[in-house]
Image: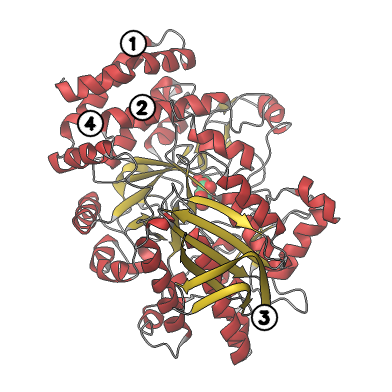
């Protein structure tokens, strides 16, 4: 072992051993094997990646300075395959993007893949998308251009076609022990009493009968996604090796998929158990030892008090970044209600967290929008959970006479009455309806609202991630209705093919695409050019005198940005508690006074020097 590795290992060894032995009693032997195997990954890591590790380790706040703008995309929808994505890097740079989340691209059985989240081989790229060499070459090209690459690490489960699952199906008990197998439905029935359902309609239940073995296997997500058993230390070691293998291809950010689910225990909800945190901390430590330049992004789509613990503590950090999921849901609630009070409260909560905690901000991603709002707080306005969720869904599916949203329900459960929502940003903002109805005024408003939502999202501390296609206001894609393997999963409505024809209109501001692209680009460039958007800026919300106008202030280095975002279809006047006098960075206009007129669905980023 070389000195650098030894030094890093020594720094963490006691904690690693303590965590490991607490999880896996008396398995110090397996820990020794793990430590010597991870050395192999360190050893084979390319010199240029090691150099980047050292550079980033010397500047651990490198990703917190406000200069990163992300985009997430499906390789095939965007450019056919990995080589195609490599050819489109100029476009990605033109968007102002320097962080690319490539959606799952590993081998996954066609038609039983859950959008690639059912991995059958963690070391092989889906041949339709290219090869591992293509991925490595793309990551290398991105590195040259200063673009970070994020990849999913789907660790909660494998596909039923993964080699381990095949061996388990063939009766090999060692491999059955890598999953949760039960001879009859007795124990699964006990689990079902306490474990909620992820896909209550598209994949009800948490267990699947497997014909080959005559046993039941745990399948929290789809029946073809078999949950891995992390109480078996071999599973953790092998999955860590898979992760390091991918990282060594030049990946900068690992998105740990469905992380709250990875530890199961009878009698619990099988979510967010303490052992999950030990495993994430172990993964973090291993990355600090092998590849300290790599960031961990946790996919924790849970209520706020469950999310924040995945940052760990400043002394014992777990994930570098987490999705700002509650803020995202509160944003769409605000769009429907035109009442910013919940969002303001949510932002106050987020802004009061330690500045080390970095959120990944987004308006839309590849998944549905779940209405996980603070209903206890909303009660004071007479808002009840059930009826409010119905209202939000009705609003965004265009069921209400005045609604402009065009979305579809997701996992609408007739038993519980619960449903989530799908749709692209542009369709949810009213662009689809206005275009369909040929209503120029409504279209203008809808584009402005889409830009306002992006302005607000981009202004938040953390890493903003744009959903590919949103930069050209891409609408819902209904073609999945005709594809039997996708029909039941309405998430495909916002996973449509990227339209090259629409992208070609991006420089023509007489088109929706052009207005959206130009507006968004201006926001991105402004953000990345100003230290005001760095994570260490002081941020607080302000009273605007209107419940439909969100006001946020950012301050840093003697500069103040007063941000105003309108969620109303009428022009409103913000009544500020102090005079402002500065320039709107979005329009370039000078604005001053205590009363500022904000156009319908408009936004301002007002810059002043602090006297
Ligand atoms: C994550 C993904 C989602 C997938 C699930 C199961 O939540 O975002 O798309 O269905 O994990 O892997």
Tell me which corner region of the image, top left, top right, bottom left or bottom right, holds residue 87. bottom left
Q: Quadrant of the N terminus?
A: top left
Nearest to the observer: residue 149 or residue 328: 328
Return the residue at label 3: 571
Q: Secondary structure at mark 1?
A: helix
**Element under disc 3:** loop
Q: Secondary structure at mark 4?
A: helix
In percent of the image, x 39 and y 17: which residue is there? 15
Q: CA distance from mark 4 to mark 1?
A: 19 Å
Question: What kind of colouring is applied to the model shown?
Answer: secondary structure
Q: Which residue is mark 2?
A: 285
Give the mark nearer the N terminus: 4 vs 1: 1
Q: Position of residue 506 (x, y in %)?
A: 38, 81
Residue at 32%, 45% (x, y): give it.
62
Mark 3 burial class by Cα count in 10 Å: few <14, some 14-19, many 20+: some
In the image, farthest residue toward the top: 26
Residue under label 1, please give it.
Answer: 29
As measured in the structure, the alpha-carbon distance from the residue carrying label 2 to the one carrying label 4 is 14 Å
Task: Pinpoint residue 482: horizontal percent, then vertical percent.
Answer: 55, 71
User: In screen coordinates, is 375 left or right of 111?
Assistant: right
Q: CA distance from mark 3 to mark 4?
A: 59 Å
Question: In the rendered view, would you say 275 is above or below 203?
Answer: above
Q: Which residue is disc 4 drawn over?
A: 41
Q: Earlier in the sequence, mark 2 or mark 3?
A: 2
């Amino acid at each position: 072992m070389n000195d650098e590795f030894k030094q890093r290992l020594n720094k963490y060894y006691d904690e690693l051993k303590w965590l490991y032995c607490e999880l896996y009693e008396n398995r110090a032997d397996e820990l020794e094997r793990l430590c010597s195997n991870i050395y192999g990954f360190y050893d084979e890591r390319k010199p240029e990646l090691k150099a980047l590790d050292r550079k980033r380790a010397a500047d651990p706040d490198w990703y917190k300075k406000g200069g990163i703008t992300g985009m997430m995309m499906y390789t095939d929808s965007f450019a056919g395959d990995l080589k195609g994505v490599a050819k489109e890097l100029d476009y990605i740079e033109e968007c102002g993007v320097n962080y690319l989340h490539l959606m799952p691209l590993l081998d996954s059985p066609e038609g039983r893949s859950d959008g690639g989240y059912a991995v059958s081989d963690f070391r092989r790229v889906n041949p339709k998308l290219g090869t591992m060499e293509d991925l490595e070459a793309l990551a290398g090209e991105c590195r040259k251009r200063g673009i970070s690459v994020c990849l999913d690490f789907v660790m909660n489960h494998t596909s039923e076609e993964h080699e381990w699952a095949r061996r388990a199906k063939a009766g090999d008990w060692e491999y059955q022990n890598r999953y949760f197998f039960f001879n009859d439905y007795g124990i699964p029935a006990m689990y079902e009493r306490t474990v909620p359902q992820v896909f209550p309609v598209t994949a009800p239940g948490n267990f699947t009968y497997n014909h080959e073995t005559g046993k039941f296997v745990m399948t929290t997500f789809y029946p073809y996604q078999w949950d891995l058993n992390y109480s078996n230390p071999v599973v953790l070691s092998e999955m860590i090796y898979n992760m390091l293998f991918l990282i060594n291809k030049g990946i900068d950010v690992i998105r740990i998929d469905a992380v709250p689910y990875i530890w199961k225990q009878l009698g619990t909800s099988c979510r967010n158990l303490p052992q999950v945190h030990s495993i994430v901390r172990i993964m973090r430590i291993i990355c600090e030892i092998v590849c300290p330049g790599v960031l961990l992004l946790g996919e924790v789509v849970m209520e706020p008090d469950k999310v924040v613990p995945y940052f760990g503590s400043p002394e014992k950090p777990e994930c570098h970044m987490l999705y700002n999921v509650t803020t995202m849901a509160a944003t769409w609630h605000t769009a429907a209600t035109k009442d910013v009070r919940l969002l303001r409260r949510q932002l106050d909560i987020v802004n009061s967290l330690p500045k080390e905690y970095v959120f990944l901000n987004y308006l839309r991603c590849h998944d549905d929008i779940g209405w996980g709002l603070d209903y206890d707080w909303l009660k004071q306005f007479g808002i009840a959970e059930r009826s409010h969720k119905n209202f939000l869904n009705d609003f965004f599916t265009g069921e209400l006479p005045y609604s402009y949203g065009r979305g579809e329900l997701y996992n609408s459960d007739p038993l519980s009455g619960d449903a989530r929502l799908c749709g692209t940003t542009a369709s949810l903002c009213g662009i689809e309806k206005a275009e369909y109805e040929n209503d120029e005024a409504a279209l203008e408003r809808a584009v402005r609202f889409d830009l306002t939502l992006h302005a607000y999202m981009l202004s938040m501390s953390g890493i903003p991630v744009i959903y590919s296609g949103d930069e050209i206001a891409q609408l819902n894609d209904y073609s999945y209705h005709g594809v039997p393997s996708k029909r039941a999963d309405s998430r495909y409505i916002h996973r449509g093919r990227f339209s090259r024809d629409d992208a070609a209109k991006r420089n023509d501001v007489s088109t929706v695409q052009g207005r959206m692209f130009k507006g968004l680009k201006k926001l991105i460039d402004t953000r990345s050019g100003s230290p005001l958007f760095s994570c260490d800026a002081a941020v607080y919300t302000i009273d605007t005198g209107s419940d439909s106008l969100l006001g946020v202030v950012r301050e840093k280095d003697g500069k103040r940005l007063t941000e105003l975002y309108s969620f109303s279809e009428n022009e409103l006047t913000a009544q500020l508690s102090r005079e402002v006098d500065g320039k709107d960075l979005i329009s370039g206009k000078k604005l001053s006074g205590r009363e500022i007129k904000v156009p319908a669905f408009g936004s301002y980023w007002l810059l002043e020097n602090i006297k």
